Amino acid sequence: MFPEIMTAHLFAPARLQARRRRARRLRLLRTILVLGALATTAFARPAWAATDSGPGRAGNTTLLRVHATRSHMHCPLPGRKQRLIGIDSPAEWTDTLEQQGEEAALGRKVRWSRERVIVFAPDMQDRHAEAVRLESPAQMIRVSDGVLYWPVRQRAIDDPAARQMRPCVMAIIDRAFWQRIRVVPARPL
């Protein structure tokens, strides 16, 4: 046989083994790098849990900006019972308040990608009850531990025709996550 062919055959397994060793080392190095990156992100503090990670955040409390509020003496929400809802999308708006557009109800269009609408309507007022108007004077609304605390003020009015009405208040706020909405009394003037 030819000597150059024999030498190539004899050294072929050694080259193959060296290539396999190099590939194993690269795989091991890649695995170590990925695990190191995962470990640093797993032990790092999540952004939502940080106490000083952005404006309006303190501990488990987040402050949301109120962009617009509107009070109505004749609530556009259907029904006579108390309702407290959050509206997330234009489709949900039309399902909930089919008779009235955003601009008529809130005074401006809602930027649904960045904002949400919250609506509070108490029970229908009795004929003998004192007529009230609802207001939301807050410029910031607090979300704490999954609960949105919305300050609402009831102001008595001297209109006898307003006694059989159902007032409500609506607000456009920053988009955020909460599980419950709780209406709290606003501070007196």
Image (cartoon, rainbow, N blue to C red):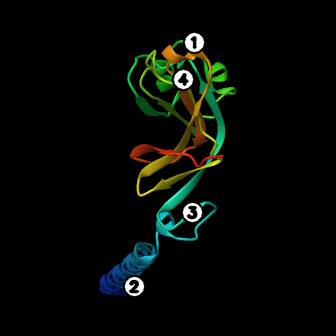
Tell me the number on the disc at residue 4. 2
**Amino acid at circle 3:** Arg
Q: Which residue is mark 1?
A: 161
Spatial separation of the CA atoms under disc 2 and disc 3: 75 Å
Is residue 114 visible in this depiction of the protein?
A: no
Other-residue count near label 3 (Cα within 10 Å), few / some / many at <14 / 14–19 / ≥20: some
At mark 4, the secondary structure is: loop
Residue 57: image tag: 3
Three-letter amino acid code of the residue under disc 4:
Ala
Q: CA distance from mark 2 to mark 4?
A: 107 Å
* Viewer-nearest of discs 2 and 3: 3
> Which numbered disc, 1 or 2, marks the residue that appears first in the sequence?
2
Secondary element at tag 3: strand
Q: Residue at x 42, y 79 (%)?
A: 36
Q: Amino acid at mark 1?
A: Ala
- Residue 62 vertical position relative to residue 141 in the rendered view, above or below: below
The x and y percentages for residue 65 are: 63, 48
Mark 2 residue type: Glu
Spot occupied by residue 75 in the image (x, y as percentages of width and height): 53, 20
Q: From the viewer's perspective, tell me whether residue 91 is left or right of residue 101.
A: left
Q: Are marks 1 and 2 in contact (CB under 8 Å)?
A: no
